[in-house]
Amino acid sequence: MLPPASGTGTFVRTSEKVIRLLRQGCTNRPFFHIVRRKNQYRPVIEQVGTFDPLPNEHNEKLTSLNYERIRHWIGNGAHVSKPVEQLLGLAGFFPIHPTSYMNAWRNRKAIKENQEKSINVDDKTEDKQ
Amino acid sequence: MAAFRFISQCLNTKTESISGLHYTVFRRLLNYSTVEYAEQNDPRPSFFNKDIQNILRTLTRVDLQRVFRTRKLGQGKVHDPEYRFMTNEELQMAMREAELKADNLLQIPPVVPVRTPISKILSQDPELQGLESSKMIFTDITFGVKDSDRLIVVREPDGTLREAEWEVRNRINQIYFPQEGRAIKTPQMFQGTEFEDVLKRQEYEFILDRACIQFEPNDPEYQRVTSITYQHINDNNGFEKLRSTRHFGALAFFLVWHKNIDNLLLELIETCYADEANTLIELYSKIHKVNFEKTSELSMIEDYIKKFSNKKGALELALQAYKELLDEKRKVEQGVKTAHGLS
């Protein structure tokens, strides 16, 4: 069952809280809620957004963020998990996360290596012929 | 020429194959072009003027029977009318209430210039190239923000962070904050042959009502659909279909704004609504800041025909016929009076 936007979790002032992704959706169809909860095993306190990692027909990945509430919770000392930090970085809300730069660099490198490999393979096949 | 005529005859009789003749059929598409209200020539000050709103309302020729007719809107069962005994005062109150309701129903959709495209870049981070192969769209879903003010940004695969264009904004707004009756994709009926088909069936009110729900009034698509519909109405004399609806004011404003009122004027004269014809000319003079003679009842119309009309012949003939009709009526009245021995 989906937790309501203002969730069932109880708010305890002294306990640590985190804004994190919560996997909803189903098998082979991930869909995330961005929620605030005490930890993975505790009920949601509030849902503050959604994230759909599968691109739609226009090749867009949709994310919704309730900036007002995110600001409020961060102001109240909530932590933000790494994936959510990356999302907020891409959204221009946070500075871009170092991991995003790292992943981008790695991806670029992998693409380059693949290209070189395919060129080498092509050369070899041509030599054989 | 003969060959052309032969082929067109064949097409008319719907014979699919003509022995020994190979031809390509070019289907004649709608030959109307979009007419938009431009930002440089802003229609807003004229349209929202109180006098002009009143004139547009007069031209709508409100018939309460038509405004409150039963309509198939897909909202469940149609109820039986309720009959009540009322005193004269109560009846007047009820009529006033109905008029207020009609006022709400007949609010003319706003006439505004077409919007300017959004091209605001917030930041450029080429270091993010390769991170994503698709665009990322981030929407602010804070409670209580208007659709038009909502922050929607796009992170491109090349690392640019910019504000989303109008087309994307509409789609995203409809996804997160759906409005009833609006579709995420533009309905087929506004495009291509389907649009032509609805126009051909003269379902103008249906088109305009749906366009009002589907688009914002400053959307180029809205202005395309409505302007083509208005032009079609003007050419096919479908004015009566829009009377007593909220769209007649917008139609009249469109025609006056683009100086194309001859057909409407002709229709008004032919159906003996000389006072409305006069109001139309007054609207023309107010919007285009020109003056017409006001010596007699029909002088304004005559002056307009002389100065600005493109259909002088037809309009003059119609006006002449109208004058003759008036003369005839006067004579008959005189005759009746003398027969009754009144004069």
Image (cartoon, rainbow, N blue to C red):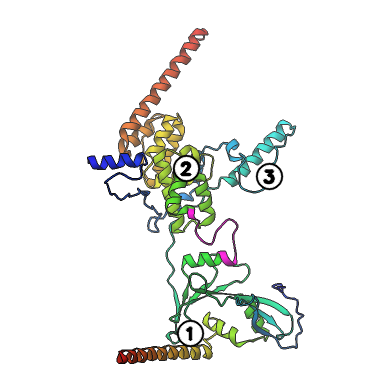
Q: Nearer the viewer, residue A95 or A27?
A: A27
Q: Report if the CB atoms under discs 3 and 1 are less than 8 Å apart.
A: no
- Whether callout 3 and callout 1 share a subunit is answered yes
Magenta residue span: B174-188
Q: Is residue B51 visible?
A: no
For the residue labelled by badge 3, is the local secondary structure a helix, a strand or a loop? loop
Main secondary structure along the magenta-highlighted residues? loop
Q: Nearer the viewer, residue A101 or A117?
A: A117
Q: Is residue A118 visible?
A: yes
Chain under label 1? B
> Label 3 to label 1, Cα distance in Å?
55 Å
Q: What residue is at 67 percent from the left and 86 percent from the top?
A: A77
Q: Residues within 10 Å of mark 2 (few under 14, many from 20)?
A: few
Chain under label 3? B
Q: Which mark is residue B77?
A: 3
> Label 2 to label 1, Cα distance in Å?
52 Å
- Whether callout 2 and callout 3 share a subunit is answered yes
For badge 2, the amino acid type reads: Arg
Determine the image quadrant of residue A80.
bottom right
> Label 2 to label 3, Cα distance in Å?
26 Å
- Residue that badge 2 annotates: B201
